[in-house]
Image (cartoon, rainbow, N blue to C red):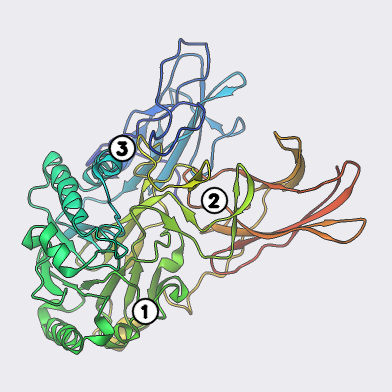
Amino acid sequence: MRFAPLVIAATSVALVSPVVAQAAPAPSPAQGPAQAHSHKPGHGTPAAPGVSVPGGRYEHAVSLKFKAERGVTVRYTLDGTTPTRDSRAFHSGRPLRITKDTNVTAVAFRGNKASVPVSYGYLIKTREKPIAKFVVMSDVHIGSHATADKKYESFFDTIGSIFPKPDAILSNGDMINDNGDGKGPDHKIVSEVFRSNLARKGMTDTQLLISNGNHDASLAAIRAGYPKAWFPDSGGGYYESTVKGLPVLTVNTETYDSSAAQRTWLKARLAAITANPANAGKPVFIQGHRPTTGTTMDGQQASNPRLAEDLSAFPQAVLFSGHSHLNINDDRSIHQRDFTSVNDGSMSYIEIDHGYQMVTDEGLANRFESPTAQALFVEVYKNRTEMARVNMAADKHDIYTGGQWSANWQPPYASAGTLSGDTWTVRLKGSTNQEIKDNFRYTDAARNTVAPKFTTRKPLKEVHTPKGGTAVRIAQAKDDQMVHHYNVDITDASTGASVVSSKVLSDFYFTPRPNTLDIPVPGAVKGGRYVARVVAVDAYGNASPAASLAFRR
């Protein structure tokens, strides 16, 4: 991420500050992070710092101070990493100023003790008013009030603090988690959770627009679970709406390729909308649960090739899709060729490309999921559409706890409202379809070619693990977007045998990101000699020069 220097001034809209947990033994997912408790000044682990201006959306720069206990030093970062004792110290007489979108992360230090890190996201806009503003989310997967109520109170606090009165919320399929096992009635639970929070936040005029997903049981179950206005289809699970005068077409990707009637409807509506001179240069939004082929995230988990075919004649089309749970940190989540396609992440847990490993408390593990929740905050202006990528929750947790899979980590979250990447800006410039396509910026041809770099003099070192083992510690590399993973090879120097050969994820989906990763060296023998070779790789495959380390255990 290329987040900006810090500059924050008067407020426009303020985001509710996350309530920060204190350092404590790891709780269960049902309990959520350990709750904050008070300390006497000068004793124990310091409390995490607060801020004078909460994270959120502002229409001008903001001046920021940290609030902390007496006798502590607050250190902070602006690049998404975790503050250390070497990070910049905050001085109370010098407020920070944020002028561009920034994640601010702070830690309070006292002696050899440190608070848990807390992060705040700031979206800095101008006073220009958008034509429309709406949230796009998907894969809610609610199954009970017990796991959803507190979680969605936090999520709606984040929504309401960025957009106090959003014009619409698009919930793009998989509201529940039905697998043919009779969970259709769970839609009523989702409806209750959403209606309760809409009322609590005063979002009485916000439109809710739902699409059908593969875990939503049936169209009949959706219709039975929600107000008609939330799913106003006429029988096939597809329909047309307007949000502040902008067309929004909802398609049913469970049947799209096999539904001649739906295909005919979509093409006819797109042709009529784009033929109207009043709509020249304006986006036509489409939401459909499954991504179509050859578009976002290199086509992972895509289907419905005929949807891509039908949209190809309409460069004003902007398609939002979910289903894959693939994260929106990755800039492959937006793609343009004949139209714009955008992956909208997931509100339950996110996925990463398969074939990688994560560093866990148990060592390297085959993982492709994280209990991170994300959504898009879309603002439509006269000459552009801006899409902010926002974390609802991105605290560092393993998807497995005590051997049990769970995506139900509960609030408070120390990362609510942080930014998972730079804002995407879509401009539809041109008087012809071809001219619009020629001005697309998120194309395969324009893919990023900048490789990550190790910026420390010695990026690798041998360390001892708490359990008495040996690990190679990687000081994380830097990239102009993000480091996706590391190719890690560790060999026994005496025999040439491979000890570790892995592609290890960089933890880019957590906020803040850890500064180091410890790669265990299994079976390392005392006195044995080993050689480690590590290459940092970004999401597009750009690779750094290798860092090497020879060491004796």
Q: Quadrant of the C terminus?
A: top right
- Mark 3 or 1, nearer chain start: 3
Judge left or right: residue 26 versus residue 164.
right
Does residue 76 sit above or below 99 in this rendering?
A: above
Q: Residues within 10 Å of mark 1 (few under 14, many from 20)?
A: some
Q: Could you tell me how far apart the alpha carbons at marks 3 and 2 are, in whole angstroms?
A: 32 Å
Instruction: Estimate the x, y position of residue 15 in percent, counting from the top left.
Output: 27, 39
Residue at (49% x, 28% y) in the render:
90
Residue in front for this viewpoint, 542 or 468: 468
Contact flag, marks 3 and 2 (Cβ < 8 Å): no
Circle 2: element type: loop
- Mark 3 or 2, nearer chain start: 3
Q: Callout 3, which amino acid?
A: Ala
Q: Residues within 10 Å of mark 3 (few under 14, many from 20)?
A: some
Q: Callout 2, which amino acid?
A: Asp
Q: Residues within 10 Å of mark 2 (few under 14, many from 20)?
A: many
- Please identify, in this view, whether the residue under mark 3 or under mark 2 is nearer the observer: 2
Instruction: Estimate the x, y position of residue 448 in percent, counting from the top left.
Output: 52, 69
- Mark 1 or 2, nearer chain start: 1
Residue in front for this viewpoint, 317 or 403: 403
Circle number at residue 303: 1
Circle number at residue 9: 3
Circle 3: element type: loop
Residue at (10% x, 63% y) in the render:
244
Can residue 496 be seen in the rendering of this structure? yes
Q: Which residue is mark 2?
A: 507
Judge left or right: residue 425 versus residue 548.
left
Q: Callout 1, which amino acid?
A: Ser
Q: Could you tell me how far apart the alpha carbons at marks 3 and 1 are, in whole angstroms?
A: 46 Å
Residue 61 occupies which quadrant of the picture?
A: top left
